[in-house]
Amino acid sequence: AEAVELPLLASFEDVCPEKGAHMSTVAVDPYIFDHPVRADLVHQCVLYHLAKIRQGTAKAKTRAEVRGSTRKVRNQKGSGRSRAGDARPPHWRGGGGAHPPRPPPLAFKLNKKGLKAGMRRAPSP
């Protein structure tokens, strides 16, 4: 494969049209720069890398995970109060959350070929 000539934006004088200067060129590797633009592949690569760096650490305990006994708190009948099972329901003090935050599934599948192809197409003009 032959080298591709791309404009090199070296200085303000090279870019400024009123100066009448020409743009410089530099020979670059066609393996990196001579690819058709694929916005979908580049977009998938960006999503893949952003998903990889996310922490996803927001988590709270449910009533099953909160520390405490599962013993029945009081008798079913005879106390005059409402019936109760264990001491960790969401509406009690010290209870677990009803729908607590959980880490979202951050898995983003991208094939190796797709990742490499997207990374090659990102710097292409």
Image (cartoon, rainbow, N blue to C red):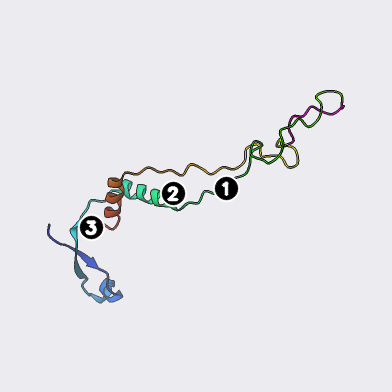
Q: Position of residue 19 (x, y in %)?
A: 26, 76
Report the residue at 26% width, 51% height from top: 37
Q: Residues within 10 Å of mark 2 (few under 14, many from 20)?
A: some
Report the residue at 79% width, 27% height from top: 83
Residue 17 visible, this orientation: no
Q: Name the quarter where the N terminus is drawn.
A: bottom left
The main secondary structure of the magenta stretch is loop
- The secondary element bearing badge 2 is classed as helix
Q: The residue under label 1 is which amino acid type?
A: Ala
- The secondary element bearing badge 1 is classed as loop
Q: Name the quarter where the C terminus is drawn.
A: bottom left
Q: The residue under label 2 is which amino acid type?
A: Ala
Identify which residue, 71 or 110, lies in the foreground. 71
Identify which residue, 42 or 87, lies in the foreground. 87
| Side of 52 relative to 35 (left or right) | right
Q: Nearer the viewer, mark 1 or mark 3?
A: 1
| Residue that label 1 marks | 58
